[in-house]
Image (tube, grey):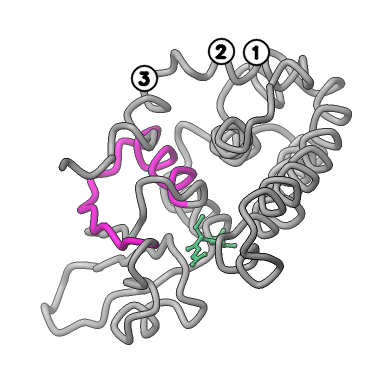
Amino acid sequence: MKFRLYHYWRSSSSWRVRWALAIKKIDCEWIPVSLLNDESEHPDHLQRNPLGYVPVLEVSQGGSPNQTPWILTESTAILEFLEESFPQPSLLPGDAFNRARIRQLAQIINSDTQPLQNPNVVERVTSDPAKKLEWNQYWIRKGLHAFETLAKSSAGKLSVGDTVTLADLCLIPQCYNALRNEILLSEFPTIKRIHDYAQDLEECKKSAPEAFMPKK
Ligand SMILES: N[C@@H](CCC(=O)N[C@@H](CS)C(=O)NCC(=O)O)C(=O)O
């Protein structure tokens, strides 16, 4: 299989997938799609993702060169596809309850937090920068508060136990957004501890926005 990821360096959903690819040591071609100049609304990109979002994973299966590649959108669906195709190291370990706890934490970020600070959502609420900040802070705090409360009973070094799971792949990029929105992680001690630990993990650094920042 050959992989190509359409992504944006600062997109938290893109970071989730870059991090999983790094953990599973999957080679990938990176195709930047800028969210600043409407590249994601270009017809070519809308064909890949009718929502005009990143990330999009393109998977070529080898065999005939004329074979149509698989196109996958939605970062959590992509993560589950990678997990099922390349089970080790596992991002969804343990029994059914443990895996449900991991998915529960991941969805608090993926469904209930990140979508509300998507630039095209916030633009429709207000164009006033101060109001945008207030909106973002409200929803990020609500999401992180819920995550913090639930993670207290599941966390080891990371959100559920001591190894990186889907929950961390969603949480750490969301922390990056929280910091960009002037929220101090010290408000959430368990999250701060997980965040600080993750900063030193090689695959986290390798997939982080700074590693993909466009060169001027
Ligand atoms: N639920 C989607 C969310 C994807 C998403 O919201 N991507 C953002 C960047 S993090 C985006 O492309 N936004 C485009 C825009 O706001 O114009 C996923 O998990 O892949």
Span of residues in magenta: 14-35
For residue 47, which quarter of the picture? bottom left
Q: Amino acid at mark 3?
A: Glu
Disc 2, SS? helix
Q: Nearer the viewer, mark 2 or mark 1?
A: 2
Residue holding disc 2: 197
Q: CA distance from mark 1 to mark 3?
A: 15 Å
- Residue 64 seen by the camera: yes
Are the residues at dot 2 and dot 1 in contact (C-beta closer than 8 Å)?
A: yes
User: Which residue is painted at 42% across and 46% down in the image?
Assistant: 10
- Residue 92 seen by the camera: no
Q: Amino acid at mark 1?
A: Lys
Q: Examine the structure image and report whether residue 92 is included in the region drawn in magenta.
A: no
Which is nearer the N-term, disc 2 or disc 1?
A: 1
Q: CA distance from mark 2 to mark 3?
A: 11 Å
Instruction: Bin the neighbour count of mark 1 within 10 Å (Cα to Cα): few under 14, some 14-19, many 20 and up.
Output: some
Position of the C terminus, as image quadrant, is top left
Q: Amino acid at mark 2?
A: Tyr
Residue holding disc 1: 157
Residue 175 placement (x, y as % from top left): 61, 32
Instruction: Bin the neighbour count of mark 3 within 10 Å (Cα to Cα): few under 14, some 14-19, many 20 and up.
Output: few
Q: Nearer the viewer, residue 16 or 137?
A: 137
Position of the N terminus, as image quadrant, is bottom left
Residue 145 placement (x, y as % from top left): 84, 33
Q: Is residue 54 shown above or below 176?
A: below
For residue 44, which quarter of the picture? bottom left
**Ligand 1 has an atom within 8 Å of the beta carbon of the residue at disc 1:** no
Residue 3 placement (x, y as % from top left): 26, 58
- Judged from this view, the residue extending furthest toward the left is 65
User: Which residue is painted at 54% across and 64% down in the image?
Assistant: 74
Query: Mark number for residue 202?
Result: 3
